[in-house]
Image: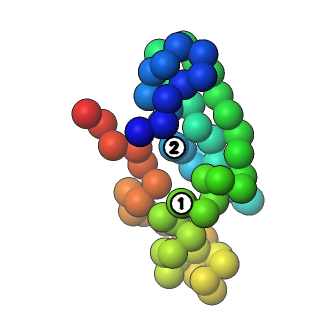
């Protein structure tokens, strides 16, 4: 689990749907946000999806691969 540097809360990994996608780590406790294309892109499950444009797909996605887990 990633910890927020400001409050110690949990950072959620998000993929904002845009072209190109914007990868964000966000703390919903205090509002801290970190935009980091290098570290999140390595762990982004959407990059392995056959619908992803980098894999020859259309870029249209209806799955839940990039949605954060709700506890």
Q: CA distance from mark 2 to mark 1?
A: 9 Å
Image mark count = 2
For image coordinates 61% across by 53% down, the residue present is 40
For image coordinates 41% across by 39% down, the residue present is 1
Name the disc covering residue 25, or none: none
Residue labelled with disc 1: 43
Spot occupied by residue 18 in the image (x, y as percentages of width and height): 68, 53
Q: Is residue 22 visible?
A: no
Task: Sort mark 2 into few (<14), some (14-19) or many (20+) by Cα contacts within 10 Å.
Answer: many
Q: Quadrant of the C terminus?
A: top left
For image coordinates 54% across by 60% down, the residue present is 44
Give whichever of discs 2 and 1 has the lower sequence position. 2
Q: Secondary structure at mark 1?
A: helix
Spot occupied by residue 43 in the image (x, y as percentages of width and height): 53, 60
Out of 49 and 62, give the one closest to the viewer: 49
- Name the mark nearer the viewer: 2 or 1: 1
Residue labelled with disc 2: 13
Q: Secondary structure at mark 2?
A: strand
User: Is 2 on the left-hand or right-hand side of 57?
Assistant: left
CB atoms at circles 2 and 1 under 8 Å apart? yes
Task: Sort mark 1 into few (<14), some (14-19) or many (20+) by Cα contacts within 10 Å.
Answer: few
Spot occupied by residue 64 in the image (x, y as percentages of width and height): 38, 57
């Amino acid at each position: 689990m990633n910890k927020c540097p400001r409050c110690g809360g949990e950072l959620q990994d998000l993929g904002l749907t845009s072209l190109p996608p914007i990868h964000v780590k966000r703390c919903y406790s205090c509002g801290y946000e970190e935009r980091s294309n290098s570290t999140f892109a390595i762990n982004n499950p959407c990059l392995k999806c056959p619908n992803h444009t980098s894999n020859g797909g259309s870029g249209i996605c209806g799955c839940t691969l990039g949605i954060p887990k709700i506890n």
